[in-house]
Image: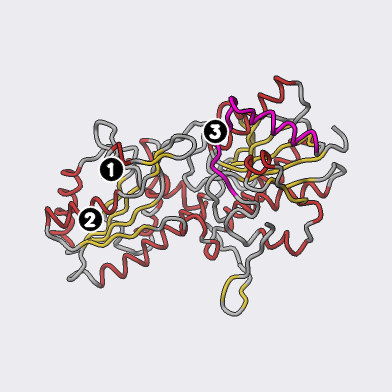
């Protein structure tokens, strides 16, 4: 493997710190005696199209900028590899043309599935390739890891948003008494649950938090809203986008109307609007909705320093592992700062780690879990009053 080149891709929805993992990989790779490192433009899609950039020649100033820049610097993707149309053959042709012996893939559970498919295909065809998955997701739902890079910054942002919006909502309680804020989290409640941090630091919001792991009905929500409104005169609700009822159906959407992504996952987000209509119709209370959408993924201006450092760490650790001959695994994080391990890609691929029942039931225990992950602020360079970000592609 001496002298073989590497390729790295980014996949899935970007986080505020996904480029910090890219920074970790590039800087650690350039310290060694290995070959070049290329960036696949838009992940596996770029490899299929032969689109890449030589990251070996990226200058130090631009590399440093990756630690402060949101989005996916190489371009993300949501592409599922297809065996029937020769995707893997095309990828190995790409690898062969460019002397690729090492493959890094930054992403969530679907991305780990892609990495695992390439790892298994390489073994099957006898192509000498080392593969390492690098975790990222604001959903915090990767298995076998204490937490995921990207989650801490998103938790910090949504908790702060609830604090600030809660102050606003309370001040407008007589005219707009109900507020509903929706976070991402198709099937897991790590992010919406994190907004309870706002209560700890003096905010009255959120009054009600609903997570996908706990079935709920329209009638239960209406009763909760009416109870809190009678007591306080206003209600701030946080909900994950994937709320389900007792039958397992998503609340607020007709099954025929749910779009799916390339991996077959439902693309949600309308639960807040649905609840607004229900509350206004049934309780006759003025309701506003807040959908943070991609802002919770890209808020680098208030990113967690712990999260950014974790993202760099898993990138650097991935290079150390792969050059030591380790392959077919994803880097994982432990509870303590700087603690890493590995998990087989086959174990992580397509699995989701739900919010445990103890975290659902015990707010104090959950705060104890999440609070260390939001500590510190990334000092983003400011020019003329706005953040200074960089571009590779």
Mark 3 or 2, which is nearer the eye? 2
Tell me, yes or no, whether the highlighted magenta stretch contains residue 78.
Answer: yes
Residue 109 coordinates in the image, percent (x, y): 53, 36
List x then y, in percent, for residue 368.
Answer: 44, 48
Residue beneath disc 2: 276
Please name the residue shown 34% across and 37% down the image: 213
Alpha carbons under labels 3 and 2: distance apart: 37 Å
Query: In the rendered image, which residue does mark 1 sit on?
Result: 253
Identify the residue position indicated by label 3 in the image: 144
Camera-side residue: 198 or 327?
327
Out of 5 and 15, give the one closest to the viewer: 5
Q: For residue 174, which quarter of the picture?
A: bottom left
Tell me if mark 2 has few (under 14), some (14-19) or many (20+) residues whose alpha carbon lies within 10 angstroms of its own.
some
Image location (x, y in percent) of residue 95: 76, 35
SS of the residue at dot 2? helix
Of labels 1 and 3, the one closer to you: 1
Q: In the rendered structure, which disc, 1 or 3, sits on the residue that comes first in sequence?
A: 3
Give the camera-side residue of 242 and 302: 242
Q: Secondary structure at mark 3?
A: loop
Mark 3 Cα shell of 10 Å, populated few (<14), some (14-19), many (≥20): some
Give the percent coordinates (x, y) of residue 331: 64, 38
Answer with the quarter of the image where residue 162 lies. Answer: bottom left
Decide if residue 108 is on the left or right side of residue 92.
left
Q: Is residue 344 visible?
A: no
Give the residues in magenta.
76-97
Residue at point 71% right, 30% down? 327
Check the picture and name the quadrant holding the N terminus: top right
Residue at 42% in and 57% down: 158
**Is residue 90 on the magenta stretch?**
yes
Question: Which quadrant does the C terminus fall into?
Answer: bottom right
Q: Classify mark 1: helix, strand or loop.
A: loop
């Amino acid at each position: 493997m001496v002298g073989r080149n590497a390729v790295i891709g980014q996949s899935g929805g970007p986080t505020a710190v996904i480029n910090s993992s890219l920074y970790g990989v590039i800087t650690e790779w350039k310290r060694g005696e290995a070959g070049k490192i290329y960036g696949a433009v838009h992940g596996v899609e770029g490899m299929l199209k032969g689109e890449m950039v030589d990251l070996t020649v990226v200058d130090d100033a631009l590399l440093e900028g990756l630690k402060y820049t949101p989005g996916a610097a190489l371009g993300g993707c949501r592409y599922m590899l297809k065996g029937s149309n020769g995707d893997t053959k095309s990828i190995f042709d790409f690898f062969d043309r460019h002397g690729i012996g090492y493959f890094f893939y930054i992403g969530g559970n679907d991305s780990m599935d892609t990495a695992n498919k390439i790892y298994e295909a390489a073994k099957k065809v006898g192509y000498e390739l080392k593969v390492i998955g690098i975790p990222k997701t604001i959903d915090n739902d990767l298995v076998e890891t204490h937490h995921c890079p990207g989650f801490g910054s998103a938790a910090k942002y949504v908790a702060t948003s609830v604090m600030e919006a809660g102050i606003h909502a309370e001040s407008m309680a007589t005219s707009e008494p109900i507020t509903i804020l929706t976070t991402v989290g198709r099937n897991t409640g790590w992010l919406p649950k994190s907004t309870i941090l706002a209560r700890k630091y003096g905010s009255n919001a959120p009054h009600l938090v609903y997570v996908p792991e706990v079935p709920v009905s329209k009638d239960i929500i209406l009763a909760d809203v009416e109870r809190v409104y009678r007591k306080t005169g206003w209600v701030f609700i946080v909900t994950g986008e994937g709320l389900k009822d007792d039958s397992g159906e998503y609340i607020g959407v007709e099954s025929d109307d749910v779009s799916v992504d390339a991996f077959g996952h439902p693309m949600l987000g309308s639960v807040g609007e649905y609840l607004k209509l229900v509350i206004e119709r049934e309780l006759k209370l003025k309701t506003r909705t807040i959908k943070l959408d991609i802002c919770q993924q890209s808020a680098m201006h208030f990113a967690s320093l712990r999260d950014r450092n974790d993202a760099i760490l898993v990138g650097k650790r991935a290079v150390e592992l792969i050059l030591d001959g380790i392959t077919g695994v994803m880097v994982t994080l432990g509870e303590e700062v700087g603690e890493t391990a590995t998990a087989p890609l086959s174990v992580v691929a397509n699995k989701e780690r739900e919010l445990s029942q103890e975290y659902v039931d015990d707010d104090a225990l959950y705060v104890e879990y999440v609070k260390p992950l939001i500590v510190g602020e990334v000092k983003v360079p400011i020019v003329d009053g706005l953040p200074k970000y960089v571009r590779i592609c």
